[in-house]
Image (cartoon, helix red, strand yellow):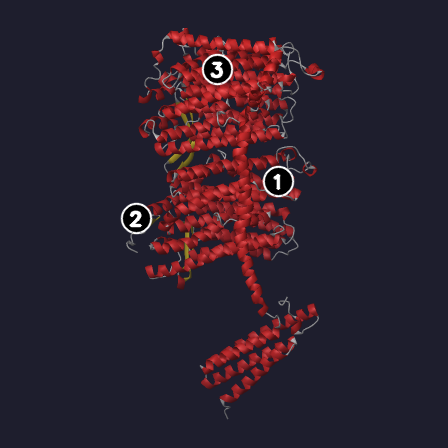
Amino acid sequence: MIVPIEHYLILSALLFAIGAGGVIISRNLIIIFMSIELMLNAANLSIIAFSLMHNLMDGHVLVFIVMTVAAAEAAVGLAIIIMVYRKRDTINADKFNLMKR
Amino acid sequence: MEDRILTLVTFFPLIGAVLLLFVPKERDDSVKSIALIIAFITFLFSLMMYSMFDPVANGMQFEVNIPWISTFGISYHLGIDGISLLLIMLTTILSVIIMISSWNSIKTGVKGYFISMLMLETGMLGVFVSLDLFLFYVFWEAMLIPMYFIIGVWGGPRKIYAAIKFVLFTMFGSLLMLVALLYLMFMYHSFAGEYSFSILDLYKMPIPLGAQTYIFLAFALTFAIKVPIWPFHTWLPDAHVEAPTAGSVILAGVLLKMGTYGFVRICLPMFPEATLQFVPLISILALIGIIYGALVAMVQRDIKSLVAYSSVSHLGFVMLGMMALNVQGLEGSVLQMINHGISTGALFLIVGMLYERRHTRMIADFGGLAKSMPVFSTFFMIASLSSIGLPLTNGFVGEFLILLGVYKANPVYAIIGATGVILAACYMLWMLQRVIFGKITKPENEKLKDLDLREKIILIPLVILIFWIGIYPKPFLERIEPAVKNIVSIVNSSRTASEAGMSKGYKCVGDRCDTHTFTTGGK
Amino acid sequence: MEYSLYLIPLFPLVGFLINGLFIGKLNKKFVSFIACGAVGLSFFYSAHLFFELLSLPAEARAIEEILFVWIPSGQFNVNIGFLLDPLSIIMVMVVTGVSFLIHIYSIGYMHDDPGFSRYFTYLNLFVFSMLILVLANNYLLMFVGWEGVGLCSYLLIGFWFEKKSASDAGKKAFIVNRIGDFGFLLGLFIIFWQVGSLDFATVFEKAPAMFAVGGTLITAATLLLFLGATGKSAQIPLFVWLPDAMEGPTPVSALIHAATMVTAGVYMIARSNVLYMMAPTTLAVVAIVGMATAFFAGTIALAQNDIKRVLAYSTVSQLGYMFVACGVAAFGAGIFHLMTHSFFKALLFLGSGSVIHAMAGQQDMRYMGGLKKHLPATYWTFMVGTLAIAGIPLFSGFFSKDEILWKAFSSQYGSTWLWVFGVAAAAMTAFYMFRLVYLTFYGEGRMDSHAKEHLHESPKVMTIPLMLLAVLSIVGGYVGIPHVLGGINYFENFLEPVLHAGQNLPVATHVLTSGSYSTGTELLLMASSVILVLLSIILAWYLYRKNTDLSGKLRTSMSGLHKLLLGKYFVDELYGAVIIRPIVNGSLFLWKIVDVFLIDGLINGLAVVIGDISTGLRTVQTGRLRTYATIFLAGVVVLLLFVLLR
């Protein structure tokens, strides 16, 4: 049985919405970060779904690239968060408002 | 070797900079020694280039032309004529000298400093060897970055202000240049059916007078800020006063020449009609610069800013001579670029030595140094006299040729310009009198150490050059001459053409002549 | 034949290099040996060349030797090359000869000075520059020497640089000279672009064809060159530096500011006689300026109390005479007076140096007196110099000064007025010189007892040059005895080949034909000037020897005039108020107001405005991550809706 494309897209949209909501609502940097990853994966899901629909390999390639980038980003991002935590003893995003003088 | 020498000279310092990255930053001495050796080897390469240079040949030498971004006609196109040759020599010599002069004065961030200096050297050399306008632009901008750091990190108390001012002024100009550059590129495409950034190709392109005027203005403003022509000069005293000694030397010695070199290499031969139109304006600004710079220099209290304002005056001479648009004026102008690099460079070095001893540069804090530091005072005197343009020093040959040429072009300009020679004597001698003559009034000045060996090694080559160019300038002049004659013939042919109602009727570059005609009648 | 002219300036150059590079490392004997030896060699070599030149036929006496191309640029081409002809050999002989004597004198005079080797280094450099000046075969090389001697003058005036007045005076000399040089340079430009060369030979050959006689260009060129000469030779309006130049050591005053450098202007004009003969207007200006200078400087000298200042103003005045000679186209007479003047003025300065040496530095004549018995050698030689400068017959000054006065009267360009003022100046010369002699050598000593004990005759190394110069001051005139006294003017005959060129121009045909006046007139004029001179000597004797109270009374009764003269007509103050102060204040204005306030203010103002705008805009940036994210998301939604619903 072939899952209809709509299902993929709905799931993807849900995942994306959860991610976006997490970014907006959460104050914890880690959670924000996770939410971003979630959004990325939502995007991946829809790309792969379209790829499947059109029977093309381009989407697969793109997803692989996004996954590698996401992995790299995760590494850098987590490192930054750890550094920030060491410096400021908190990962509450609202406390980081140096730009606001 | 012929076709690699330019690449070698230009990029060798950059290789050195990369090399320095791998030296641990605690090992100051090895950083310094490596930087010095790199600069010295670059100098040796440039000497080799000098000996290979054919002084009588017409046109560009050691040309390299490798496509780079061929879609837009951008290529790695290098080549030099006599004008660039001398400026390259000046750059490599001054680079060696500043490496030695920074030996003790830079105490923090040694590694970064020397890397910046080497990068700066590549940037400067790149500007002088580029025959591709895009490449020229890249080097022009690349030069800014290390200079920004040199002023901003190793400078004096108001270093941030000075560095930002310097960058903003220069950036403002170079953005205009970028726009003009793109315009030229598209114009060349519609003229020749292909893209090219080659300066030599662009020489041959006829440009209608209206467009020429705008492009000329864009380029001229870029270069005018760099020269600096009055009234765009106010960044200069700030940058000089705040920059570390070596920075000032390079700034005065080479960076200011970028502007005048740009005029000679790009504005004059590429836009001859527009140049002719703007001769009166630029000459008058140059004259104002000469007098104004000298007068303001006279009342300065800081020796370094006095020398900085004297640069405004000297560069006014360079521009004035260039605008004479005849062989003598232009030749004098090019020679004066070199001379200014040597004598003002020496003056900045000398002021730096004083600063290292007393940590002040105020004229009022000195007096009677001839007693406590006779050797220093002798060097100071020689450098000042060369800056004044005393016969048998380099300054005289340059100023004389400039004024001779200007007199031919317009006697009134020459008369006004020559008063600058009097004023130069006023501010320099007055400063000398207050610094090295008189009684020692401050006890701190009594036991000042005279120059040590390192400092003598820095100054002696410059003094030798001062007298060499003053007494036997022929080797220099004969190398400049073919290039200068080219430019003069381009401008003159357009002068006669425009008198005959034609615009850029034909142009000759070297021995290649092009006979595109382009009438502007009615437009 | 090879003459190796370059050797003449080379010797002093080598001396300069040896002494300069090893300064402080050589002992005094060696330094003075090198310095004097170098100049001595130059002198003997030029004497040798002089005889070589004499052995040539008159028209072949011009030897040009080119060393190398100096500045080549397009059609402009200038060589380092030397020209030896009667005019330059006379200058070379005078320069090297007098320099040699003064070098020797300096060994004694500067013996205890800590700057001994520096002094001789500068002095050799000076001789080198001066020789370049007189030997150059083109205007530009002449200009090199011209500025070179200016530099040495600057260094030597400010030799005792710890004294503010000395370094001030040096700076003033250099800057005032620069003003003259400015004119010189512009003159060269006119000549070059008109004639196409700066070589003397070419210029003088082509100039008559290239310039219109009496035209604007030639007048401008010669006037500009003359501006240079007024700077170097201390004529109105640029004479102010010379009296101050007396801050230098006295032998320097003798060498540079009396015998050699200051005469460069006269030499230059004589050299350019072809050009000057083509510009009658300039000639008139030269003559008037020369005479005005001679007269006014003479009046100032009447009231000065400083022994060297009297001599300085006297130099200015005598230089004025030389310019008068040039102005009436009697270039030979000018050079003749240049030569005799360099003998007796060097003698007078060195003599005054000997006095100052004995007085331990005191230069004010009011504290001297009665030195005759303490300094016999100085006194006698000084007397010879005084008689020579006063123009007493049989002394050299008489012949040369009389020649000038006669030419001023009789030449086509001359006039009776020039003669009248000339004689008046001559009378004043005699007066102030004898005033000086009486105040210094005669009467009671007015110095304090300590100074009195110190009085001593100078060592032989100083008195022998004085004696030699005294001999020259007497015999120097006999090379040019005027025809009217039955002599042959060897001097002018010798110079003829150089100076005839200008006088053969069509405009100047009847200059030399002063025959319209009878010999009787000439003798009468000569006699009257001599009588006037004698009368003023008697007046000086009466005022300063016989009836000394009277001079004091005279001073108080004419205190206004006296103040004016003593204050040198307040020219320095005038220049200060009219030129220097406005320039300095104007410069401050340019710096503080135009540069810092206007230009920088404009740019910084622009920056401030942009900064303010940015500050307003930055309130949008809350700095909270979640706000940004919300706005970002809202933006995406809005865009999506826009795309979907369009």
The residue that label 3 is drawn on is C424
What distance separates the C-alpha of mark 2 from that of mark 3? 66 Å
Disc 2 residue type (three-letter): Ala
Q: Position of residue B291 (x, y in %)?
A: 49, 41
**Label 3 element class:** helix
Locate the C terminus of chain C and report the quarter of the image it occupies.
bottom left
Q: Position of residue B93 (x, y in %)?
A: 52, 45
The mark lying in front, picked from 2 and 1, is 1
Looking at the image, residue B404 sits to the left or right of residue B235; the answer is left
The residue that label 2 is drawn on is B497
- Residue that extends furthest to the bottom in the rendered view of this protein: A1
Between discs 2 and 1, the one toward the N terminus: 1
| Chain to which mark 2 belongs | B
Locate the N terminus of chain C and report the quarter of the image it occupies.
top left
Vertical position of residue B59 compared to residue C41: above or below = below
| Chain to which mark 1 belongs | B
The residue that label 1 is drawn on is B363
| Chain to which mark 3 belongs | C
